[in-house]
Image: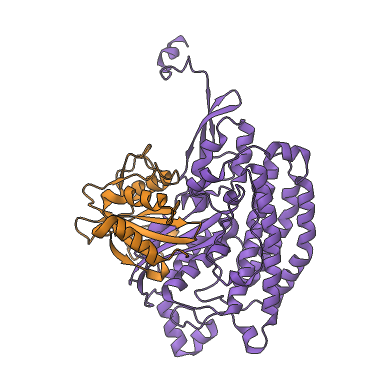
Chain colours: A orange, B purple
Amino acid sequence: MPLTNEIIEQKLVEHFGDQLTDFEVPYGLLSFVAPKDLNLKVMQFLYDDPELKFRFLTDLTAVHYPDKKGAELAVVYHLHNLVDNIRLRFKVFTDIAQPDVFTATSLYSAANWMERESYDFFGVNFVGHPNLKRILNVDEMDYFPMRKEYPLEDQTRIDKDDEMFGRGGSIGI
Amino acid sequence: MSEQHHHVKLPEGSIEKTTTTLNMGPTHPATHGVFQNILELDGERIVSAEQTVGYIHRAFEKIAERRPLYQITPLTDRLNYCSSPINNMGWHLTCEKLLGVKTPKRVDYLRVIIMELARISDHLICNSIVGVDAGAYTGFLYVMQYRELIYEIYEEICGSRLTTNIGRIGGFERNFNNTAFTKLEKFLKEYPGVLKEFENLFMRNRIFMERTMGTGAISAERALNYGFTGPNLRATGVDYDVRVHQPYSSYEDFKFIIPVGSTGDNYDKWLVREQEMWESLSIIKQAYQKVQEFKGAEAEVYHADVPAYYLPEKKDVYTKMEALIWHFKIVMGEAEMPKGEVYHAVEGGNGELGFYLISDGGRAPFRLHFRRPCFIYYQAYPEITKDSMLSDAVITMSSMNLIAGEMDA
């Protein structure tokens, strides 16, 4: 019998009970939310289970939801079962004041740089990561630029005397 | 003079050190892009390597959070700029998935033609650069004229060559003109001979084989653990290809094979890319044939009917009220965007190029993340170059096809 989203959901619920929430299938992709302390257990279960076989980490990234108080940062995992060719996505949420999430590097070598990137841009502290330092930004940076409190420059600003870019000065907008 | 010696502070233990530290990059002829490798060498043997990336980070993901959909397409150009049309179409396909747009078959086939041309130009660069790094410049120079021809075809369709910004949500900006098809025919006619000649230069070339066989090898298991995709993964023997596993743009209508290697070394990577070019050629032929089979009004279809997201033709914008309104709404980013979370992947030149788009219904994405294949597989570089010779590590770097634009986003 081919592996379907229903079977995966059923197996996860059997194993983790009601700890996993928000099961949805947007655009055909099974997704759910796990408590952050369980992220490794969920991944290990998905990896080890002889039927599930989710053994490929496609993507790992973070999202900042400033309106979710106490759960502002999300780490998003995209996993792929290459044998049955089925994907899933799950998120763990963490408080921005203490953004500690266990690292997936022991399970996937691929997680190393993806977690460094998520740390670099969102400040997620991956507990147990072998080399958690900035990767794309300069080491001296003292903030996490992808957080929503850092807006991009206002495109309509006129106080900037920068004629080379056609703004302000004698050229106008 | 002697006083100066007091000011030189050597790091602790540096006198006793038996290895040499060598910086390869950020600007070095062998890196073919801006990134750095700090190599620890024992003679010519590599003890360890540490990479630094991010020199050309341009904050695409942050910028995208303020841009309407169409203004994000030019950002995707600048990821893997050796095959920008694939990035553009991957992005448009992601938007179409979010918006629920269904494209006509002719559009799919035209897209397939362009994407496979882009794949050929991507692999052509990679494989010929491997040759350059092994000391054979001729092949590189010779095949450039066919990359040029591919660029001329892009030019007929979208007006630009390298950073193409090609296509629209739902299709293309205009129908392919006759010059585009004539050039495509010329390409289909002449390229097989050139590719064969290029192959003859390298494939059974003793020097090339000895330089590439057994170097830069990785096992399938490690490659999967490192998140390898694309030709680098297939060279290890895993037949994962997004075009087959999650077909998009009607790839299921075409007959082609996924070439695989066995050892994952530089020679296998080269062979896989080479064979993929032949497969791409065959796909283009099939697609072109399918395109020619459309008759009458169907043969004029080049976009889906989605007025809310497809930019209307310029002459309509000047003469029709409705077209003007849509044009304004689309350009200003006022077109409605549904809420949702989408992950869509295409088979880019380097592997699975993924777009993770979260929309909160605003004018710009709430969050957009690019899964850049070469950022992910470059992590494996220290592991696969350990204990190899410095000159082999150079070839390993070029045969992984590391594109700084894609790595740094």
**Which of the pair B300/B72 is nearer the observer?**
B300
Q: Quadrant of residue B351?
A: bottom right
Q: Is residue A11 visible?
A: yes
Is A58 left or right of A44, judged from the image as shown?
Answer: right
Residue A40 point in image, percent of width and height: 33, 48
Residue B285, compared with residue B208, is above or below; it is below
Q: Is residue B158 visible?
A: no
Q: Residue at x 67, y 48 (%)?
A: B270
Identify the residue at the far left of this view: A69
Residue B136 point in image, percent of width and height: 74, 42
**Which of the pair B215/B154 is nearer the observer?**
B215
Residue B311 point in image, percent of width and height: 49, 78
Q: Residue at x 61, y 49 (%)?
A: B237
Is B145 left or right of B404, judged from the image as shown?
Answer: right
Residue B216 point in image, percent of width and height: 60, 39
Is A68 left or right of B239, judged from the image as shown?
Answer: left
Is B312 left or right of B234, judged from the image as shown?
Answer: left
Q: Residue at x 53, y 22 (%)?
A: B19
Q: Quadrant of residue B240?
A: bottom right
